[in-house]
Image: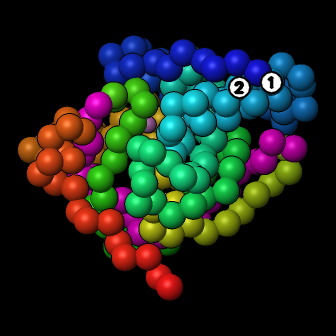
Amino acid sequence: MAILKTAKMGHPILRATAEPVGPDEIPEPGFQQLLDDMVETLRDYDGAGLAAPQIHEGVQVVAIEVRHNRRYPEAPTIPLTILINPKVTPLTDEQVAGWEGCLSVPDLRGLVPRHRAVEVEALGRNGKPIRFCAEGFFATVVQHEVDHLHGILFPDRMDDLRTLAFISEWERFWRTPAPTPCS
Ligand code: NI
């Protein structure tokens, strides 16, 4: 296992379209190692998700997981989800604006509109097809990560760049109070 170096905004790989993974490649040890390394990197950086171009690999793979996240303390838990060759279809025209950050756009947050619910089709790490619906924060993370496979970064999706903020200032002026936990 290895923690991989992340590409930062300005690196051309973040603006390239990632290649689909051939089904024959998925069981190969080198590819499975890449998946393990992506998960380790995601956890080490406290990300909610990581797309392969962010670790300088131009292939259509994303890893998503949220649990006790220091960068997103209010976020709901998302179990580890690996998506290979993902396709995202909006289930509603309704868009919800939420605050996003990105390991490739460090220290910044911005308000980004996303479809509230999406259908996701992909292959899992065992090569078997996966299909599910995601809503709310999970839907936002999926859309953010799949955008990375198409060379899109969250500032490209912002309606109003005036909400772009350094995290230090965002915490002072923009952060909403944590929701009261249900009991
Ligand atoms: Ni990102």
Using residue 14 as the reference point, say whether residue 155 is left or right of it: left
Q: Quick check: which quadrant has ligand 1?
A: top left
Q: Magenta stretch containing residue 119, yes or no?
A: yes
Asked if residue 180 is positioned above or below residue 50 in the image, the reply reads below
**158 vs 181, nearest the viewer:** 181
Cα separation between marks 2 and 1: 6 Å
Whether residues under marks 2 and 1 lie with C-beta atoms below 8 angstroms apart, the answer is yes
Q: Residue at x 83, y 19 (%)?
A: 30
Residue labelled with disc 1: 33
Q: Residue at x 31, y 58 (%)?
A: 98
Does ligand 1 reach within 8 Å of label 2's beta carbon?
A: no
Q: Which amino acid does label 2 sit on?
A: Asp
Q: Magenta stretch containing residue 138, yes or no?
A: no
Task: Give the dominant element type of the magenta stretch: helix, strand or loop.
Answer: strand
Residue 125: percent from left, percent from top: 81, 42
Q: Check disc 2: other Cα within 10 Å, few if <14, some if 14-19, many if 20+.
A: some
Which residue, as the protein is rendered here, is positioned at the far front? 183
Q: Which amino acid does label 1 sit on?
A: Gln
> In what quadrant of the picture does the N terminus appear?
top right
Residue 64: percent from left, percent from top: 60, 46
Question: What is the span of residues highlighted in magenta in the rendered image?
Answer: 107-126
Residue 56: percent from left, percent from top: 56, 17
- Find residue 37 and name its label: 2
- Find residue 63 and name its label: none
**58 vs 137, nearest the viewer:** 137
Residue 57: percent from left, percent from top: 61, 20
Asked if residue 91 is positioned above or below residue 87 in the image, the reply reads below
Asked if residue 124 is positioned above or below residue 30 in the image, the reply reads below
